[in-house]
Image (cartoon, rainbow, N blue to C red):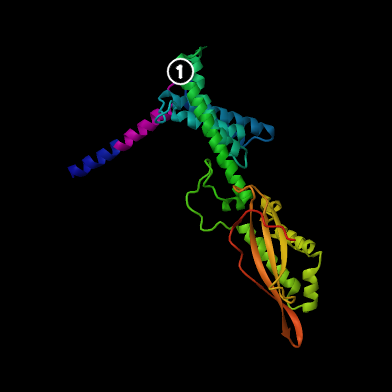
Amino acid sequence: MELVKDLLGGVFKFLEDIFKGLQNLLSPPQAYSWQTLIYLSIFSWLMSFFARGFVTSIITFMGWLFLIAGTAWYTTDKPVMIPGTSMPVGSLITGALVSILAFGNENNPITAASFVLWPTISALITAIPEFFQGTGTNVKSQIPKLETRQKIIVLLASSILVSCWLNLLLVTDNWIKSYPSLLADDFNRQALVFRLEKPKTRIPRNGIVILQKLETRVEEEIRNRPWSEVEQWLIDPNLKTRLDQLAREVIDENLSQFKEKTLWRVEPRITNINNQKDEYRLDILSIWLGPSSNPQGYYLKKSCEIKPIAKNKVNLAKIECERVSDFIDGSPLPQY
């Protein structure tokens, strides 16, 4: 029985200590304290739910200011430094709140600008107190000592560099989403871009899609048509124009969500097989016009064999296409 009593007493003592700690943390020791500012921010946000029109924005803005001021005050009372730097962890928290307030919006509080400028704003928040001395309402401006100024310059320069890297990260991510065929390129000679894993293939997916969809369109154009008509179609001087039109339709339908759709060009190549009049090879080239590590770019190729077959005493056209070729560096040779 005594053991149970001691055990319960220890539990109650533990809970009492936690309650007292929270009470000391949340109870303002005086009217001018960080707790008061936090409570004012909560009160402002609660009141904003009952306000209407522009008053809502004003009250919400004041709530953000109270939250930022209270957070900055609390985190600078006993600052915890980021290892290896002169920046307090509290500055990162305050900087994040300032970034969200300055560059966020209701639909997306964490925008690209707020994310990129967060380290720089945090560094500025860390540096500002060094230009003032005193506490409370008795504050005077001062010029930091030489050693402190050096630390401020290093901190600001490092934070701006981090912001630049974050911006590069976002820009690169946006490029990859808009121009996914860039991933097919070779980055071995690039100092700023590297792959975490080696890609299984260098064939760009969009280039494959263009050729596969265009193959279907070409098959619809000539399959089971009389050979005489197909042969005239193959030697028609306007064949390139016709295929360009089909390719543009394919690209608009399948690559509409990518900005790179304007960076693909399709060219046909018509040749006789073994100089036989009734057998032709149609090579469809999907040429990349965008940026590439190779100044001459690259292209993909799909080869189709077109020949007549006898069916019901009538020669009809038959087409058989190979799979898309591997990644071919350089520009295709001109057709003469």
Q: Is residue 212 above or below residue 31?
A: below
Along the line of sight, which residue is nearer the eye, 137 or 215?
Answer: 215
Q: Is residue 320 left or right of residue 147?
A: right
Along the line of sight, which residue is nearer the eye, 40 or 200?
Answer: 200
**Amino acid bearing label 1:** Thr
Locate residue 302, reporting x and y percent: 65, 65
Q: Is residue 90 above or below residue 334?
A: above
Question: Dominant secondary structure of the magenta stretch?
Answer: helix
Q: Quadrant of the N terminus?
A: top left
Crowding at mark 1 (Cα within 10 Å: few <14, some 14-19, many 20+): some
Q: Which residue is mark 1?
A: 148
Q: Is residue 21 magenta?
A: yes
Q: Is residue 104 left or right of residue 142?
A: right
Look at the image and tell me whether residue 37 can be seen. no
What count of labels does the image hold?
Answer: 1
Along the line of sight, which residue is nearer the eye, 82 or 95?
Answer: 82
Part of the protein shown in magenta: 14-29
Along the line of sight, which residue is nearer the eye, 23 or 105?
Answer: 105
Locate residue 252, reporting x and y percent: 72, 57
